[in-house]
Image (tube, rainbow, N blue to C red):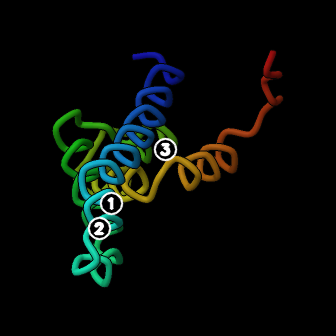
Amino acid sequence: MNELLILAGAFALAFFTEGLVEYIFGTPMDKIPKLAPFKWLLMYVAAIVGVGLTIHYKLDLMALILKSEPDMVGIVITGLTIGHGSNFLHQFISKFFPGKPVPIA
């Protein structure tokens, strides 16, 4: 599969994970005062969702970088990266895939 499509899929999963976890779990924690002290759990929920999605889609960014076969360690690392959110993934990709920035119209 094309490397750019894999990276686009990783970015999409990061955005979806972050958005859906905030919508499904974060909104009740903002609206229900008794749940507010547990808002710190959102990062763990996002990590679990991210790892679950990467296992389901067998997405391994480490294998893409190292030009190797996907394995469970790389999949879990990718899932944790996706669970951390789109900003962290952007920093990761920018570091290992440097290039010319794409101008935004």
Pick whichever of labels 1 and 3 is earlier in the sequence.
1
The mark tally for this picture is 3
Residue highlighted by disc 1? 26
Q: Is residue 4 above or below residue 43?
A: above
Whether residue 9 sits left or right of residue 101 in the image: it is: left
Look at label 3 and name its amino acid. Answer: Leu
Residue type highlighted by circle 2: Met
Q: Please identify the quarter of the rendering in which residue 38 is found.
A: bottom left
Which x, y percent locates residue 104?
Answer: 79, 21
* Residue 45, image quadrant: bottom left
Mark 1 vs 2: CB contact within 8 A:
yes
What crowding class fits label 3: few (fewer than 14 Cα within 10 Å), some (14-19), or many (20 or more)?
few
Q: Residue at x 50, y 24 (%)?
A: 3
The residue under label 2 is: 29
For the point 25% across and 48% down, the residue is: 71
Residue farthest bottom in this picture? 37
Q: What is the CA distance from the residue labelled 1 to the residue labelled 2?
A: 5 Å
Query: What's the amino acid at mark 1?
Result: Gly
User: Quarter holding the N terminus?
Assistant: top left
Reading the image, the residue beneath label 3 is: 66
- Tell me how far mark 2 sits from mark 3, CA to CA: 40 Å
Which residue lies at the image location 43% right of the left edge and 36% below the top edge?
10
* In-front residue for pair 94/31: 31
Check disc 3 and report its element: helix, strand or loop: helix
Bin the neighbour count of mark 1 within 10 Å (Cα to Cα): few under 14, some 14-19, many 20 and up: some
Pair 2/3: label in front? 2
User: Which residue is depicted at the point 29% across and 67% down?
Assistant: 29
Q: Is residue 77 left or right of residue 104?
A: left
